[in-house]
Image: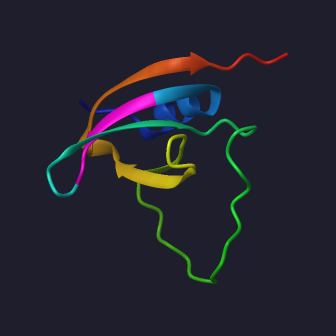
Amino acid sequence: MVINKTDLKQLLKKNTVEIKFKKKDGSERVMNCTLISDVVPVYEKKTERVRPDNDNLLAVWDLDKEAFRSFKLDSVIDYKVLEEAYEL
């Protein structure tokens, strides 16, 4: 499954999404995640190190582990919206 990073980020900013992807070790993982600003804590940078931007990598807030996690876009097997956020 090929997915556009920009489209997926927009989806995650408004919804809780279940993403199924293949890990580096070949096993499959299902992650419930989001980028909704009211849910994701403010990121505090701990070092001055700057990572190069990677168009194939996406960092998200893992709702089950309550931590930032990332995955490669080309490893995504499937995804579905679990809960939509509504603005008041």
| Residue under the image location 67 percent in, 45 percent down | 40
- Measuring from the top left, give residue 33's x and y in whole percent: 51, 37
Which residues, given as a range, are shown in magenta? Answer: 18-23
Q: In the rendered image, which quarter is residue 54 located in?
A: bottom left
Q: Quadrant of the C terminus?
A: top right
Residue 57 visible: no
Q: Main secondary structure of the magenta part?
A: strand
From the viewer's perspective, tell me whether residue 25 is left or right of residue 79.
left
Check if residue 73 falls in the magenta segment: no
| Residue under the image location 47 percent in, 63 percent down | 53
From the viewer's perspective, tell me whether residue 66 is left or right of residue 37.
left
Q: Residue furthest right?
A: 88
Residue 24 visible: yes
Q: Residue furthest bottom?
A: 48
From the viewer's perspective, tell me whether residue 52 is left or right of residue 44.
left
Q: Quadrant of the N terminus?
A: top left
In the displayed structure, 39 sits above or below 72; it is: above
Check if residue 22 falls in the magenta segment: yes
- Measuring from the top left, give residue 57's x and y in whole percent: 39, 53
- Measuring from the top left, give residue 55's x and y in whole percent: 40, 53
Q: Nearer the viewer, residue 65 or 82?
A: 65
| Residue under the image location 50 percent in, 41 percent down | 64
| Residue under the image location 28 percent in, 40 percent down | 21
- Measuring from the top left, give residue 15's x and y in whole percent: 59, 25
